[in-house]
Amino acid sequence: MIATTQKPFDEIIGALEGYEKIAVIGCNGCAKVCMTGGDEQVAELAGRLRDQGKEVVLEATPDRTCYVDNTHATLDPNLEQLKQADAVIVMGCGGAVQITRKVTEDYGLIVPVKTALDSVGHMDTLVSGELALEQCQECGECILNETGGICPVTKCPKGLLNGPCGGSENGKCEVNPERDCAWVMIYNRMSALGELDKLKRFMAPKDYGKMAKPRTLNIKERKVS
Ligand code: SF4
Ligand code: SF4
């Protein structure tokens, strides 16, 4: 999931300065899991905006706002309310915000689309409802097959590809001793799989050109460019 945190309310109000009629759009996907943009948080933000004297003309929460079809499915029946808005605030990841902007453009609306959240990475829930841990940086050249399904690009703060640095101690990372060293985790996993010999292979430097943004995925042709 794309993990998000809520911006401070002062920043949200600042982004909406000069706009009085507001549509609040959430996301019942990742942002719901992060408790930053599900139905509950949309209602809460709408209430706080009303307390500040704003008129909330629409509250809506697509299932996954980063899916253009989902966002259309939720907003199409609410188009008349959306048209009244002089600003839209989205409680979703950066993708959700930009898809919402695209959908407003599809309707021919010229309306500012703002974000209420900060996107902080591709994470998965470690402890349900409490803690999410970054798992993948979408490097475009996945090496999980060689590392026992544990990503050193993401989980080692130095992104080391061929074993631990000299600072690993008692299985912990020198950068954050509360975390396990990614390479100790990889070693233990490969050991459990009986595949330690595979760690002797040299891992060539990654082609970070494959991380150059923005990337495009042609879904039909399965090609990234
Ligand atoms: S190697 Fe790259 S694609 Fe694979 S999990 Fe790590 S960052 Fe993601
Ligand atoms: S201690 Fe392990 S995880 Fe931490 S920086 Fe060194 S190799 Fe990477």
Image (cartoon, helix red, strand yellow):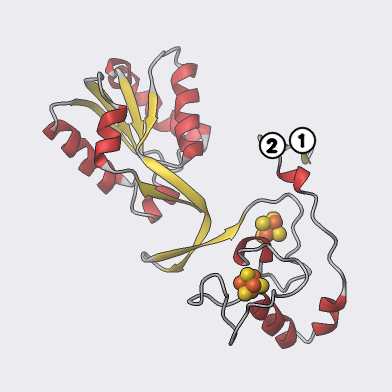
Cβ of disc 2 within 8 Å of ligand 1? Answer: no
Q: Would residue 105 be found to the left or right of residue 15 on screen?
A: right
Q: Residue at x 63, y 77 (%)?
A: 167
Which quadrant does ligand 1 occupy?
A: bottom right
- Residue 123 vertical placement versus 91 (above, below): below
Residue 155 sits above or below residue 179 on the image: above
Q: Amino acid at mark 1?
A: Ser
Q: Residues within 10 Å of mark 1 (few under 14, many from 20)?
A: few
- Farthest front residue in view: 166
Q: What residue is pinned by disc 1?
A: 225
Of pointers 2 and 1, the one earlier in the residue sequence: 2
- At numbered mark 1, what does the secondary structure look like: helix, strand or loop? loop
Q: Residue at x 38, y 50 (%)?
A: 5
**Residue 215 tag number:** 2
* x and y percentages locating residue 104 in the rendered image: 43, 20
Q: CA separation, marks 2 and 1?
A: 6 Å
Task: Give the image location of residue 37, x and y in percent.
Answer: 34, 45
> Compared to 63, does 104 lie above or below?
above
> In the image shown, does 126 or 121 lie closer to the viewer?
121
Category of crowding for the residue at label 2, using alpha-carbon neighbours closer than 10 angstroms: few (below 14), some (14–19), many (at least 20): few
Residues at discs 2 and 1 in contact (Cβ within 8 Å): yes
Amino acid type for the residue under numbered disc 2: Arg
Q: Quadrant of residue 65?
A: top left
Residue 193: % across, % down: 74, 84
Q: Which quarter of the rendered picture does the C terminus lie within?
A: top right
Q: Is residue 161 left or right of residue 96?
A: right
